[in-house]
């Protein structure tokens, strides 16, 4: 999709489709009112005729309008004017662009960003439009041989009508950020949707290396099992023992902030397939466990977006990648492994493997002298039980960092909810035979998982995002969501200001 800005009076505008807003009770947005006057009240009459109230998400496509310059008008409901918030605005955008892609137009002009949304600037409103347009257009077809039924939409160009020349830079900034974030989200979705026999740890590393070659400020390297063995990453390597696919530790170093600036380190769990190991998962829905690398995919997607935007800061992405399968050489319940930090871990459940690869990676992150470390992982089903699939779970050892992530999530509408990791929960990780166990029992599973990770993050500001409920959709819309790429990029944009 090609995005651009346009400055032109509605009287002279020419387009295949003009996208306009309508508030509830058929109250017209400013540009809609101007066009309605030009058309002698036609838009208002059609809204009333078709009983379209203007609720958030309502759409009315008008295929024939007077004048000949504008071929179609798409009216989009925005809800109550004085209650138009981020949720309603995004719902309206989503409905608009789903309708737009099927209307037959090749070129469209949108004026939806003219409305007030909680004091947000034009750049943010346009960015949301770009992100949601790309989401509406997304289709995973890489593994389909016959694509005859997958008709591509005709729409290829979307312009945003700027109210004045002074608004153009804001609209262009919104387009630029939206495109970079959308491409990062698409990359994360594609990686998450690929099957485990294609998206192996080696494949994940190859994709990261490919991105590194495309950006001068981005250096990508890959640690092999021999490298990790020399570093003493016994916990991470123990997970890979049951797989024929060698583990990889992907290191992506973006240098945009100068040599002395401390980097923000993103750590993403990269389990390219998780069968649970000896503690085998139930067969039902096990096919979906290819998504257990979505944390790693989101880190790779976020680093790509940061490099595209050229943010003036340093960022490091670390993705430990492995499979977790049952095998004669795999971890067994009761085994004890030694982490890079020197902490011994009793493996009480081999399906709690994500924390085993993350803990060594957190220890490795210390060498970068980080400003902050954020790990992202599809870590626990318990987080879905606690929070459902709307927010990601947030835990951490630094209030300021957690508050920054909450604000970034609200801005990007990739929201999080903070949960406690009080010392009280650490008691559940006690082991009779090692320094700690890798599970803490059935109570507070997402919290005890974070408590486990906190043992390896004492030397820096650290936050943990449990995305088990947000990185993947089940049911008819089964597939990766690309979350929390938008959250991570927004957090980094905020740090670059």
Image (tube, rainbow, N blue to C red):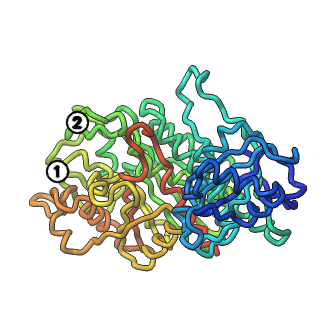
Q: Which residue is drawn at 24% across and 63% down?
A: 448
The residue lying toward the viewer, choosing from 221 and 446, is: 446
Q: Quadrant of the N terminus?
A: top right
Q: Which residue is drawn at 29% across and 49% down?
A: 353
Marks 1 and 2, Cα distance to the nearest angstrom? 18 Å
Left or right: where 441 falls relative to 145: left
Q: Which residue is drawn at 59% across and 51% down?
A: 51
Q: Mark 1 points at which residue?
A: 348
Give the mark count: 2
Q: In which quarter of the image is the C terminus?
A: bottom right
Q: What element carries label 2?
A: loop
The spot of residue 463 in percent (x, y) is: 40, 68
Q: In this view, does 349 lie above or below 288?
A: below
The answer to whether any part of residue 226 appears in the image is no
Q: Residue at x 66, y 32 (%)?
A: 152
Classify 10 Å Cα crowding around label 1: few (below 14), some (14-19), many (20 and above): many
Q: Residue furthest bottom?
A: 400
Q: Mark 2 points at which residue?
A: 282
Q: What element carries label 1?
A: loop
Q: Which mark is residue 32?
A: none
Left or right: where 58 falls relative to 14: left
In primary-sequence order, the first of circles 1 and 2 is 2
The spot of residue 92 in percent (x, y) is: 58, 56
The spot of residue 442 in percent (x, y) is: 16, 56
Q: In this view, does 9 lie above or below 186?
A: below
């Amino acid at each position: 999709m090609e995005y651009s800005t346009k400055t032109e009076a509605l009287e002279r505008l020419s387009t295949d489709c003009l996208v306009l807003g309508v508030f509830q009770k058929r109250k017209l947005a400013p540009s809609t009112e101007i066009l309605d006057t030009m058309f002698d009240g036609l838009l208002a009459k059609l809204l009333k005729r078709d009983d379209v109230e203007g609720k958030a998400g309502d759409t009315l496509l008008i295929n024939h309008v007077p004048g000949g310059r504008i071929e179609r008008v798409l009216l989009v409901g925005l809800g109550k004017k004085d209650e138009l918030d981020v949720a309603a605005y995004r719902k309206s955008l989503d409905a608009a662009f789903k309708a737009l892609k099927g209307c037959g137009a090749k070129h469209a002009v949108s004026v939806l960003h003219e409305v007030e949304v909680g004091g947000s600037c034009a750049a943010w409103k346009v960015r949301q439009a770009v992100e949601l347009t790309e989401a509406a257009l997304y289709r995973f077809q890489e593994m389909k041989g016959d694509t005859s039924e997958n008709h591509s939409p005709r729409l290829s160009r979307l312009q945003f009508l700027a109210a004045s020349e002074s608004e153009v830079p804001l609209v262009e900034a919104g387009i630029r950020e939206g495109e970079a974030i959308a491409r990062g989200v698409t990359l994360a979705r594609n990686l998450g949707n690929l099957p485990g026999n294609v998206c192996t740890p080696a494949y994940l590393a190859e994709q990261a290396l490919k991105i590194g070659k495309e950006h001068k400020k981005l250096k990508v390297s890959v640690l092999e099992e021999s490298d990790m063995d020399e570093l003493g990453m016994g916990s991470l390597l123990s997970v890979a023992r049951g797989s024929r696919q060698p583990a990889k530790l992907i290191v992506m170093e973006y240098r945009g902030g100068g040599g002395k600036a401390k980097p923000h380190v993103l750590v993403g769990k990269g389990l390219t397939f998780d069968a649970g190991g000896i503690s085998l998962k139930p067969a039902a829905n096990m096919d979906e466990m290819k998504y257990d690398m979505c944390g790693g995919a989101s880190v790779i997607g976020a680093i790509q977006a940061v490099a595209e935007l050229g943010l003036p800061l340093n960022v490091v992405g670390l993705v430990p990648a492995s499979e977790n399968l049952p095998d004669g050489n795999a971890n067994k319940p009761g085994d004890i492994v030694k982490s890079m930090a020197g902490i011994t871990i009793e493996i009480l459940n081999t399906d709690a493997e994500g924390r085993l690869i993350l803990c060594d990676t957190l220890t490795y992150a210390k060498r970068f002298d980080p400003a902050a470390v954020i790990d992202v992982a599809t870590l626990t089903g318990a987080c879905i039980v606690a929070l459902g699939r709307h927010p990601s779970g947030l835990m951490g050892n630094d209030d300021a960092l957690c508050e920054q992530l909450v604000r970034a999530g609200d801005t990007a509408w990739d929201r999080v909810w903070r949960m406690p990791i009080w010392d009280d929960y650490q008691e559940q990780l006690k082991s009779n035979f090692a320094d700690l166990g890798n599970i803490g029992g059935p109570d507070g599973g997402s919290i005890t998982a974070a408590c486990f990770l906190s043992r390896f993050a004492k030397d820096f500001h650290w936050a943990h995002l449990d995305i088990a409920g947000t990185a993947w959709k089940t049911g008819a819309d089964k597939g990766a969501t690309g979350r929390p790429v938008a959250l991570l990029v927004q957090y980094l944009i905020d740090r670059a200001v």
